[in-house]
Amino acid sequence: MGQLGPINRNDSRDSVVIRLMNMMKIAKQRGAEVIIYPELALTTFFPRWYYPTMKEVDQWFETEMPNTATQPLFDLAKELKIGFYLGYAEMVRSGSDRENKYFNTSILVNQEAEIIGKYHKVHVPGHNEYEPWREFQHLERRYFTPGTDFPVFEAFGTTIGMAICNDRRWAETYRVMALRGAKIIFIGYNTPVHNAPAPMHDDLSLFQNALSLQAGAYQNGIWVVGVAKAGNEENIQMIGGSSIVAPSGEIYARCITKGDEVVVATCDLDFCDVYQKTTFNFKKFRVPQAYLPIVEE
Ligand code: ING
């Protein structure tokens, strides 16, 4: 795990990439095959601010990957032979500017620094218009187009799933990818302590983060890795709590700071069988005809 501390509005992409590279070197020294970075790991969490048009928001988006700012990270990954998961704001240019698509994206990069997987955040939380009653905005639904699928990817000798932030709160996220054979799911997140619509629960934000990750792991018999962008970012407190959760649902490893922090663990993927061949033997115990409401509007 490569947990990030705050990225402030004026922090350049280059300065962030240096931080990511420093953590990549430490992870490699500790024997890591892959390092998981947070959601929107190249910029501050800009959906906390309102912009009238997408023109002003473009500054936060990458139009290609790798690009000038991130090429050094890819080069280091290739040199060290280590893979990574990276979350970032992706703009997909098409015809005229009007049709540009904007996604909250994560990529999976193998040990040859090849992008072998891309995911667009499906569960996009927040709101579309400025809401003055909020201490700060959460305008992801204004800036990002939701993804429509949960693909899985063959990498590092296993099958890997990816999700982003709010996705981790939804049981369907894990089940779809576990049904497709994922043995470990990487999830970057940027979660403020304060959730305006449910302020009475601010003191439960770390608990609900862990609950979501642990339930997703246990109920599918898979490993789950959740990695935060943490700390005081532009005067907004973001939770840390980055965790590696075992198929038993136990927290196997955890970050304990709210800054840049590397934690490495060896995830024994055979451990998935202990649950996937017994309690969560999907083929034997699932009753799909009873689940139909799940796929209805
Ligand atoms: N952030 C938050 C998350 O799902 C949120 C939004 C916070 C929703 C607390 C509900 C409760 O962790 C992102 N970026 O999805």
Image: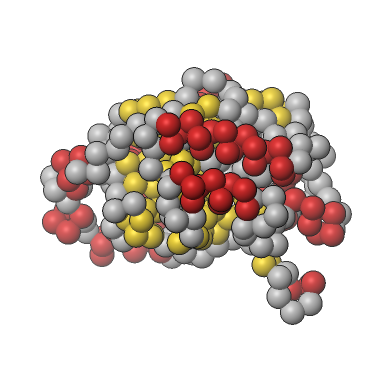
> Compared with residue 292, is residue 276 higher up or lower down, i.e. above or below?
above
Q: Residue at x 33, y 28 (%)?
A: 252
> Compared with residue 50, is residue 155 higher up or lower down, i.e. above or below?
below
Question: Where is residue 15 drawn, in percent x and y?
Answer: 71, 37
> Compared with residue 113, is residue 49 higher up or lower down, i.e. above or below?
above
Q: Residue at x 55, y 62 (%)?
A: 147
Q: Residue at x 64, y 41 (%)?
A: 17
Q: Depth check: give the residue in front, 186 or 158.
A: 158
Question: Where is residue 171 drawn, in percent x and y?
Answer: 39, 48
Q: Depth check: give the residue in front, 103 or 257.
A: 257
Q: Depth check: give the residue in front, 38 or 297.
A: 38
How many numbered callouts? 0
Question: Where is residue 10 drawn, in percent x and y?
Answer: 81, 37
Q: Is residue 176 visible?
A: no
Image position of 31 (left or right of 235): left
Image position of 45 (left or right of 35): right
How are the residues colored?
A: secondary structure
Q: Is residue 145 visible?
A: yes
> Compared with residue 2, is residue 64 higher up or lower down, i.e. above or below?
below
Q: Residue lying at the far front in this picture: please name it.
A: 79
Instruction: Residue 296: name its quadrant.
Output: bottom left
Q: Residue at x 71, y 70 (%)?
A: 93
Question: Where is residue 162 drawn, in percent x and y?
Answer: 45, 52
